[in-house]
Image (cartoon, rainbow, N blue to C red):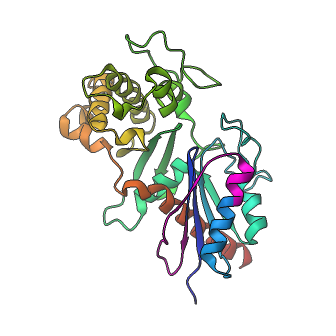
Amino acid sequence: MALPTIAAVEAGGTKFVISVTRENRLGKSISVPTSDPETTLASVIGAIKRELRGGSLDAVGIASFGPINVDTTSTSCGRIGATPKLGCSGINLREYFQSAFSCPVGIESDVNGAALAEATWDIEQPIDHLAYVTVGTGIGVGIVHSGSITNGTSHPEIDHIRVPRHSDDLSFTGVCPFHGDCVEGLASGPAIFERWQSTLSDHSQDHIAHDIEAFYLGQLAANIALHHRPEVIIFGGGVSQTVGLIPRIREECQSVLSAYLPNLDTPTGISSLIQAPRLGEESGIRGALMLGKTAIEATQRHCT
């Protein structure tokens, strides 16, 4: 039996990343800037067709920014919900790609896709219970347990919780159009830029911007640790790659927990909990590929 051809799509607020996989090998990554939906999706479809060179697809896997309907039993599965990304609310990505390629489409939140890959992708030591946090244009959290994505009625939205304010950040109102000063409104890339008119990495390590960012992300990590008790919390996304940020997040998280979880109240324990991505920048696109494979398996089960 021939191995499937799958288009993996990582849909982000800044860019879409596409990779067409043949024989279980990720193809080259193609990046399309995120603009208005019509332009962006047309460019993505065009890029996939060029890679296929007249061939066909067996499936598409999409790891997308949210909120997005990921309930496969819903008639609106794949529809993007209320989002600050201009013109994207109401777009149904699953229907769009099914119409373009007449094949199964697997879809999940971008962070759930990245979490799935980080937990299980061709790694000798899979992580049984993992949380993945992305910090970039937005903030998102995905959860995987025993090799499966864990959702409730939809994917987690813990990035919109409110946390105590840093004492040097009381006047900043936040950038979330729905909640103002939730974690995403205080610690996303746009929030950093709104305060300083620059990125976090533009500032020296002793600048207060680093303390403020770590303060909020450390609280987010503590909330995840208390709510989900994961083995590992991975911080990915562009902001998380800032030099020195993850060690600061660990310190803040440990401080917030106040020895309540003894196994995390040591340098070794907190370092084991909060980590950088094992797959580097490929977590999302590899997760999208896995979602495409899952869509094929679901179709085969339905047909038998």
Residue at position x 34%, y 55% from top?
A: 278
Compare residues 11 and 108 and report the one nearer the observer: 11
Q: Is residue 144 left or right of residue 72?
A: left
Residue at position x 76%, y 67% from top?
A: 100
Compare residues 113 and 204 and report the one nearer the observer: 204
Whether residue 193 is situated above or below residue 61 in the rendered picture: above
Q: Is residue 257 left or right of residue 45?
A: left
Residue at position x 42%, y 62% from top?
A: 120
Compare residues 5 and 41 and report the one nearer the observer: 41
Magenta extent: 19-42
Q: Is residue 20 magenta?
A: yes
Q: Quadrant of residue 291?
A: bottom right
Rendered location of residue 259, percent (x, y): 26, 25
Q: Is residue 79 visible?
A: yes
Q: Is residue 77 visible?
A: no
Rendered location of residue 249, percent (x, y): 32, 32
Residue at position x 69%, y 72% from top?
A: 299
Rendered location of residue 56, percent (x, y): 68, 79
